[in-house]
Image: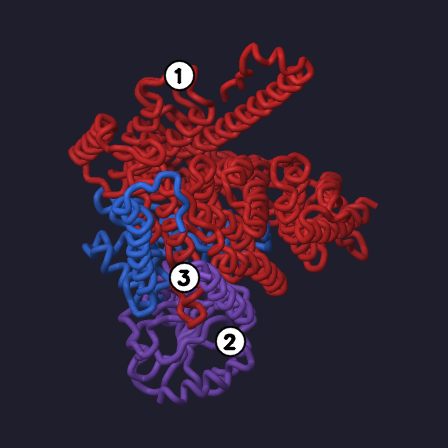
Chain colours: A purple, B blue, C red
Amino acid sequence: MRIIFAIPLALFLFFAGLAAYMLTQDKAQTIPSQMIEQPLPEFSLQPALDGMPGASKSDFIGGEPRLLNIWASWCLPCIAEAPHLERLKDEGVDIIGIAVRDQPAAVADFLSRYGNPYSRIGADDISALMLEIGASGVPETYVIDAQGNIRYQHIGDVRAETVPLLLEKLEEAR
Amino acid sequence: MMRFALAILALIAGPLGVGQALAQQAMPPAPYAYVQLENPVLEAEASALMETLRCLKCQSQSINDSDAPMAGDMRHQVRSRILAGESPDQIRSWLVQRYGDYVSYEPEVSATTWPLFAIPLLLLAIVGLVLLRRLGKRRSDGIDVGGEAV
Amino acid sequence: MIAELGLAALWLSTALAVLQMVSGALGLKDGGNSQFAIYARPAAVVQAFLAVLAFFLLLYAFAVTDLSIKLVATNSHSAKPLIYKLTGTWGNHEGSMLLWVGVLALSGGLLAGLERRLPEKTMSATLAVQGFVALGFYAFLLLSSNPFERLPVPAIEGGGLNPLLQDIGLAIHPPTLYIGYVGLSVAFSLAMGALMTRQVNPNFAKILRPWVLGAWVFLTFGITAGSYWAYYELGWGGWWFWDPVENASLMPWLAATALLHSVSVLAARDALRTWTIMLGVLAFSMSMLGTFLVRSGVLTSVHAFAVDPERGSFILALLCLYIGGSLVIFALRAGSISEGKRFSVTSREGALVFNNVMLSAILAIVLLGTLYPLLTEAFDVRVSVGPPYFNPAGAIFAIPMLMVMAIGPLLRWKEDKPARIQFELALVASVVIAVIALVAILGDYGILPVLGLALSIGLAIAAFLPLRGRRLRLVPVATWGMVCAHFGVAVALFGMASESAFTEEKLAAVAPGDVEEVSGWTIELESVDPVAGPNWTAIEASVLASRDDEAPTRLAPQSRNFWSPPQPTSESALITRWDGQLYVVIGDQAGVDAAGNNRWQLRVWWKPFVTFIWYGGLLVAFGGILSIAGRVQVDLKRRRASAMGQERRDDLDALGDADAADGPVSEPAE
């Protein structure tokens, strides 16, 4: 038996092993941001509705670490995460919201239905801030320390089990 | 193409987030999402770049081939940055810095992608060797008339 | 009853596959003397009838929208037009797998029913392998993807078919592609049969060739049709995206193309024996690999669709069994096959070897690029590999291949002198250089499109050079096939290069009455109106397009919203001219203009010579058909001739030796 004739077999076995391993793995659905441990970019967003302030980078500087929550009134998981954000707010966390591609009336309607955990809401009409911080979907939640650095990214809606995790990350970011 | 080709090959699933897409469409798209740059040279640059950037919300489509709102927002970024004088390479690396190699269809040599480039080179070497062995040696051997090789 | 009949037919087929496998294996063991070996052929033929019957029963269930069958209820809808009810049969996992299995059984049946030239022992081995392969796919279908499963309570209405699939393309593309994919199983079984019985020789190659050619013709046609379908259906004007599913269809084609060339060498010159066997195994392996990639969900692009990891594991097990098994046998046995006859570098074989190596290298690149994201994901890193990788990496090997393709057919078998074809060489080379120079003067285009244009024109001329100095009436049909196929490659290449170099794009927000210009075309949006179809509503634009002074042509692109399942699609509108296509798409509303009229997104492309891509693909497929016809014709002639020779000999014998002195009986020339 010449070794060269076994090469196709070896290549196939390598593939089969890889494929078998990947079948057992959960499929990575998300694209994590590469901006963790990087400073927030400079930005300044208009208020997403009347009667609330907009958001800019300077709002994250000083004091305690904060949460940056990317959401939208058209996003169904955002409804699910609303009560958990409320709990975080009750724990004394300052949550700054970014409403993506949203209309003021729709934002107001959403907040009146599902509660308003935000201290400020900036309007990101063209996903500009999303792209700046490497967010690939709605909702996403970021832990930002008092120096304005991104410390942690949570992809998807905040659930009951995410709340302690975020509190812990906020504590670490002090 | 992806959602399409996949679908042909028979894996039909409910399209995700149709409701979302409809609601998001209520918002006008970003200024440069569907508007070309005036300058044809710049537009050509932008378009060539957009063909090689991956839509993050789609099934394997470039942002140039997608109606997803986020793809439109990415096209807006590309066109407005090109207009502001940035080079396509700068814009690509700006995105790669934020999303990693996933966002670019054009892999660059890096710690994670070097085999993509090393293997073709290896292949080239193997092809050269095989051709030399199969063809080159024969010539120096002379032509074996009707003989069986061992 | 229909579902139960279908299921019964499938189970019977499975039993027959076992019979075919066992009887074939016994035939192999006893050298064709086993009493039991005679069952292999009838088992394969009857199995083909049953599997095809099962498929038609499912087709019937879809036609009448039998909502008590789970598959129909999930994937069909009573309000769909009949044609899409029928084509929806294979627009889902289970149905398409049944189509796959039906074609597999049919190929096996045809092989068993038609092929009489192989030594019995080799035939037994081949049928055993074919039965073994079929058995695995029957098991997969019945155990994990039963298309005939009943619902406990019939559904009231079906879930509907993905709107992107509600197109005539679904009637053409998947069936032809599947015939191609699965037709290669015959090449696989024959290669394994010949390897196991050590019958790798020109006779085997001549038997293998029509099967490879047949599958290859269907693959070529299926890929061409799929590319055009994607082009007009997706609404962005792209015709090839290098995504995993497309690559899954390209890889078997590349392997089959290499195989049909190496088979020719084996048939004509008794060389490249192990290589041909390897390609025979590889071609069908690529078909099965594609099935795995598409249905298992391991690749990023596939995962959002409903896939079942259990199915993935099942197919992977089949892959290990068939690909792994055949490669083990290959590793053990290939050494015992001698390499075959030798030849010089400047010979037809030399050129074909070069072509084979290059095609295999392109295949390796496509395979690498397709699987690489899977590899990095094992380390939690996600990367994308797309056109900017595949195009140049593929071109490194495609360009030398195309160059050799231009001159290879001019060379003689075994040994030739380059000096003999120096006129042809000089002609093709000067054409290529002239075109490169011309295009470089005309404008600033990418290097690949320019090389593509130049090579395509050089190749188009070179394709006909083998006919030079020959009396055309005497040129064998198979040679015409080759000329046609090679010319088709040139035509397709020209279309690809032209499309990528010269396409003009225009995106605009226009109100009714507004006029836009692109590449000499004047495009006016006349009006935008709502329209409704059987299972969708849409807005339809009325667009007037004209160029030069001709009368305007009315185009009606639509933006459709299907309601079951709810999904928007763009229906593009096209004007086809000899020198290209105008491609118009209507998008969303885009605000209002100064006068308060609604404006709409209009996307327009002028794509010069883009149609040549698919004309070329059709020419390649037609070349394959000519080649099959030519081989069959020669074969029939030879059979008739030898039958006549035999008859005459018998006559002579009857007349007695004395009369034979009149002269030797001349065998008719081939």
Whether residue C83 sits left or right of residue C150 in the image: it is: left
Q: Which amino acid does label 1 sit on?
A: Leu
Identify the residue under disc 3: C372
Quadrant position of residue C450: top left
Report x, y in % for residue A83: 55, 77
Name the subunit of mark 1.
C
Q: In this view, does C232 lie above or below C390?
A: above
Report helix, strand or loop for mark 2: loop
Chain under callout 3: C
Residue A152: x and y in percent read: 39, 79
Amino acid carrying mark 3 in the image: Tyr
Q: Which of C409 and A89 is in front in this view?
A: C409
Q: Which residue is drawn at 58% across and 49% down?
A: C197
Q: Badge 1 is on which residue? A: C472
* Label 3, label 2: how far apart the Cα atoms are: 33 Å
Q: Are marks 1 and 3 on the same chain?
A: yes
Nearest to N terminus: mark 1 or mark 3: 3
Are discs 2 and 1 both within one chain?
no
Q: Identify the residue position indicated by label 2 in the image.
A: A158
**Disc 2 and disc 1: Cα gap in Å?**
76 Å
Q: Which residue is drawn at 37% across and 49% down?
A: C362
Please tell me which residue is depicted at 52% across the width and 62% down the height of the picture.
C298
Q: Which picture quadrant has residue C494?
A: top left
* Number of numbered labels in the structure image: 3
Give the amino acid type for the residue marked by disc 2 in the picture.
Answer: Val
Asked if residue C250 shows in the view, the reply is: no
Residue furthest to the right in view is: C1
**Discs 1/3, front:** 1
C196 vs C443: above or below: below
